[in-house]
Image (tube, helix red, strand yellow):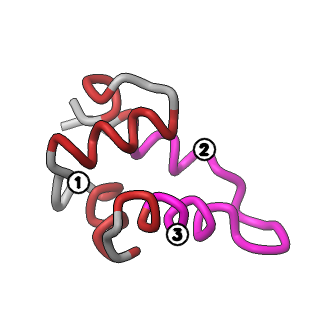
């Protein structure tokens, strides 16, 4: 199984800045979806998949269709 588009977006974020961009990205999505940061990390690594409502929120936030993000 290859990487999901969702994971590719996460991997493309820079690793160094005032606040780690990956951490900020995870925090933002966790806040928008009203879940823990750990849950978002599980989505990134593919151990869990967000439900349809959360996929819709993420899709809208990132401007990418859910079908592309979570294949």
Q: Residue at x 21, y 30 (%)?
A: 71
Residue 65 percent coordinates (x, y): 36, 23
**Which of the 4 image quadrants contains residue 42?**
bottom left
Instruction: Name the residue beneath numbered marker 1.
Output: 46
Q: Residue at x 51, y 27 (%)?
A: 63
The magenta segment: 6-29
Q: Tag 2 or tag 3, which sits nearer the N-term? A: 2
Q: Residue at x 53, y 49 (%)?
A: 11
The answer for how far apart the CA atoms under marks 1 and 2 are is: 16 Å
Q: Tag 1 or tag 3, which sits nearer the N-term? A: 3
Is residue 9 in the magenta section? yes
**Which of the 4 image quadrants contains residue 38?**
bottom left
The answer for how far apart the CA atoms under marks 3 and 2 are is: 16 Å
Mark 3: give few (<14), some (14-19) or many (20+) Cα within 10 Å: some
Residue 58 percent coordinates (x, y): 39, 43
* Nearer to us in this view, 33 or 17: 33
Front: mark 3 or 2:
3
SS under mark 2 = helix
For the stretch drawn in magenta, the main secondary structure is: helix
- Residue 12 is labelled as 2
**Which of the 4 image quadrants contains residue 55?**
top left
Residue 69 percent coordinates (x, y): 34, 33
Up-down relation of residue 14 to residue 12 (above or below) = below
Up-down relation of residue 68 to residue 6 (above or below) = above
Q: Tag 2 or tag 1, which sits nearer the N-term? A: 2
- Residue 27 is labelled as 3
Up-down relation of residue 35 to residue 5 (above or below) = below
Residue 2 percent coordinates (x, y): 27, 35
SS under mark 3 = helix
């Amino acid at each position: 199984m290859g990487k999901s588009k969702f994971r590719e977006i996460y991997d493309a974020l820079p690793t160094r800045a005032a606040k780690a961009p990956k951490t900020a990205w995870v925090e933002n999505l966790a806040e928008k979806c009203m879940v823990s940061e750990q849950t978002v990390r599980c989505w990134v690594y593919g151990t869990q998949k967000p439900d349809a409502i959360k996929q819709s929120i993420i899709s809208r936030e990132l401007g990418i269709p859910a079908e592309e993000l979570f294949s």
